[in-house]
Image (spheres, helix red, strand yellow):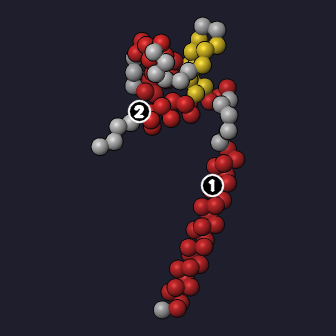
């Protein structure tokens, strides 16, 4: 029985090491701040959310969804939209 326990312990330690490496890689590749490449247009955001563009614009007028305005154009952060979806979800 000791051999099984030490074998499991080695496999568990190996898995822990692999998970730690993956988490470090993920942390290094995920930007902390919103970058230009993280912004989506209203068309892309409406498509992602499965909404009509007019519905998305109505939501921005009511300040229901986070957005950024540059000149006359609206942009939406992928991170903010993801958080919006998570916060808007209903659990039973």
Please give left or right for residue 78 compared with residue 58 in the image: right
What is the secondary structure assignment of the residue under circle 1? helix
Residue at 62%, 64% (x, y): give it. 18
Q: CA distance from mark 2 to mark 1?
A: 27 Å
Query: SS class of the residue under badge 2?
Result: helix
Tag nearer the camera, 2 or 1: 2
- In x, y percent, where is residue 10? 59, 78
Which of the image's four quarters has the C terminus?
top left
Q: Nearer the viewer, residue 69 or 51?
A: 69
Image position of 52 with respect to 11: above or below:
above
- The answer to whether 63 is drawn above or below residue 71 in the figure is below
Q: Residue at x 68, y 34 (%)?
A: 33
Toward the top, the furthest residue is 72
For the point 60% across and 67% down, the residue is 16
Q: Which residue is mark 2?
A: 88
Q: Which residue is mark 1?
A: 23
Is 85 positioned to the left or the right of 23 in the image? left
Circle 1 Cα neighbour tier, 10 Å, few/some/many (<14 / 14–19 / ≥20) = few
Specify few, some or many for label 2: CA neighbours under 10 Å numbering under 14, 14-19, or 20 or more. Answer: few
- For the point 56% across and 85% down, the residue is 6
2 or 1: tag closer to the N-terminus? 1
Residue 80: which disc? none
Q: Is residue 43 visible?
A: no
Residue 72 percent location from the top left of the image: 60, 7
Q: Residue furthest right?
A: 28
């Amino acid at each position: 029985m000791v051999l099984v326990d030490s074998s499991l312990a080695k496999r568990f330690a190996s898995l822990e090491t692999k998970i730690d490496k993956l988490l470090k890689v993920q942390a290094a590749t995920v930007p902390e701040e919103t970058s230009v490449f993280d912004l989506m247009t209203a068309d892309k955001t409406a498509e992602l959310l499965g909404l009509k563009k007019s519905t998305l614009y109505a939501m921005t007028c009511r300040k229901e969804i986070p957005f950024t305005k540059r000149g006359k154009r609206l942009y939406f952060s992928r991170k903010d939209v993801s958080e919006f979806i998570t916060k808007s979800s209903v659990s039973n």
